């Protein structure tokens, strides 16, 4: 039985449907992420799991029990917010002890549990400090410790790393992965940052306008997006309209407008005549001097329109002869190498047939 089961949950605000008939199951021990653009309904869904808000229809079950009549403080759930929500006039230790005191735990038990919680977030020497004496990352670690001290069945995390700068955010991502492994508590994490979702999660639900577009492991979400929205929202991708000319279990032959024919991997349920999109990730596209192009079926000439140097990699934007644009990524793996091509250089782009993803309309 799933630990958390969201069954056909809908939430409307006036005539606006913020969460539209959503069903999700989260297994015990999972790091599960709700990912989607601003306004897609992630926070609304999280608030209903926590009990701060109620569905208009549908059910939320924890350990098989319907939570409908259970107020937030009685649910075995804790929420960590982006703003930390620490009490400024209390020490770190008292902040962490707060949920235990509310639950009426004995003093000696509180002491041991707070010490353990401080230890788990590597803040053992910070118990006597006040929140304003901590960095952003340390405050967030206190918030995690407070969230876990009561040993909830489920920890809900609403953009908890959103206020941190990029470097600290990356450090905290590693810590969060380790913390979740250590404590074994089920995490439901909300973010609009796709990299963060890919790095942290066991599974991701991609949301759009109150609906779930796809639920899968990170590598499936990235490598096999179900539709244009998921392909476009997660990572970079070049997309072109296409029509299926011929379909076999291993190959699809596509007509991609005036670009000509493209061959891509076979896909179940696709037949000749179907319309859709061919999508290819920049790191799957080989860019080379036209004279050195690899002998691949999918092979087109173009010229470098622009490039973006990012230190470890350079992304080239290539304009093809038919006016379409494709992005190709090259690692700057040779020492000191910043770029291989200049704007205006004639180049060839090619890719293996199974690197292309056909998304039907
Ligand atoms: P963000 O990443 O910006 O926090 P989100 O995906 O968490 O976005 P929600 O906060 O769940 O989005 O909001 C979903 C939609 O519901 C939004 O259009 C929002 O304006 C609307 N909404 C949320 N709460 C209310 C409310 N109490 N009253 C009216 N509309 C609301």
Image (cartoon, rainbow, N blue to C red):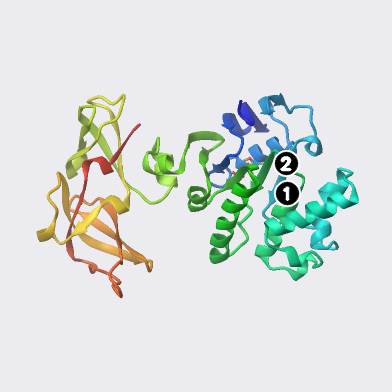
Marks 2 and 1, Cα distance to the nearest angstrom? Answer: 8 Å
**Residue that numbered label 2 is attached to:** 152
> What residue is rendered at 78% in x and 37% in y?
72
**Residue that numbered label 1 is attached to:** 147
> What residue is rendered at 62% in x and 49% in y?
182
Q: Earlier in the sequence, mark 2 or mark 1?
A: 1
Compared with residue 72, is residue 248 higher up or lower down, i.e. above or below?
A: above
Compared with residue 60, is residue 149 higher up or lower down, i.e. above or below?
A: below
**Residue 343 at what x, y percent from top left?**
24, 67
**Residue 269 at what x, y percent from top left?**
31, 24
In the figure, is residue 134 to the left or right of 316? Answer: right
Residue at the far left in the pictured view: 291
Helix, strand or loop status at disc 1: helix
**Residue 60 at what x, y percent from top left?**
67, 28
Residue 301 appears in the figure: yes
Compared with residue 192, is residue 289 higher up or lower down, i.e. above or below?
A: below
């Amino acid at each position: 039985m799933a630990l958390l089961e969201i069954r056909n949950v809908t939430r409307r605000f006036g005539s606006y449907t913020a969460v539209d008939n959503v069903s999700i199951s989260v297994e015990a021990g999972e790091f599960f992420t709700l990912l989607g653009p601003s306004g897609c309904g992630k926070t609304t869904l999280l608030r209903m799991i926590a009990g701060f808000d109620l569905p208009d229809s549908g059910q939320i079950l924890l350990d098989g029990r319907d939570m409908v009549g259970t107020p937030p403080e009685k649910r075995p759930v804790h929420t960590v917010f982006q703003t930390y929500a620490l009490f400024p006039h209390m020490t770190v230790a008292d902040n962490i002890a707060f949920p235990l005191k509310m639950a009426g735990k004995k003093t000696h038990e509180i002491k041991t549990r707070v010490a353990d919680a401080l230890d788990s977030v590597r803040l053992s020497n910070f118990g006597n400090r006040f929140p304003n004496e901590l960095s952003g990352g340390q405050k967030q670690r206190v918030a995690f410790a407070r969230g876990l001290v009561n040993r909830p069945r489920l920890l809900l995390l609403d953009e908890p790393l959103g206020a941190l700068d990029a470097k600290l955010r990356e450090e905290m991502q590693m810590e969060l992965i380790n913390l979740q492994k250590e404590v074994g508590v089920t995490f439901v994490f909300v973010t609009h940052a796709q990299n963060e979702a890919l790095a942290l999660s066991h599974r991701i639900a991609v949301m759009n306008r109150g609906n779930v577009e796809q639920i899968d492991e990170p590598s499936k979400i990235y490598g096999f997006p179900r539709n244009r929205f998921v392909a476009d929202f997660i990572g970079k991708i070049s997309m072109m309209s296409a029509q299926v000319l011929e379909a076999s279990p291993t190959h699809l032959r596509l007509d991609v407008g005036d670009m000509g024919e493209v061959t891509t991997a076979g896909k179940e349920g696709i037949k000749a005549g179907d319309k859709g999109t061919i999508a290819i990730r920049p790191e799957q596209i080989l860019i080379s001097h036209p004279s050195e192009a690899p002998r691949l079926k999918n092979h087109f000439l173009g010229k470098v329109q622009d490039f973006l140097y990012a230190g470890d990699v350079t992304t080239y934007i290539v304009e093809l002869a038919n006016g379409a644009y494709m992005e190709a990524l090259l690692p700057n793996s040779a020492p000191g190498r910043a770029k291989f091509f200049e704007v205006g250089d004639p180049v060839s782009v090619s890719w293996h047939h199974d690197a292309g993803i056909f998304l039907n309309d």
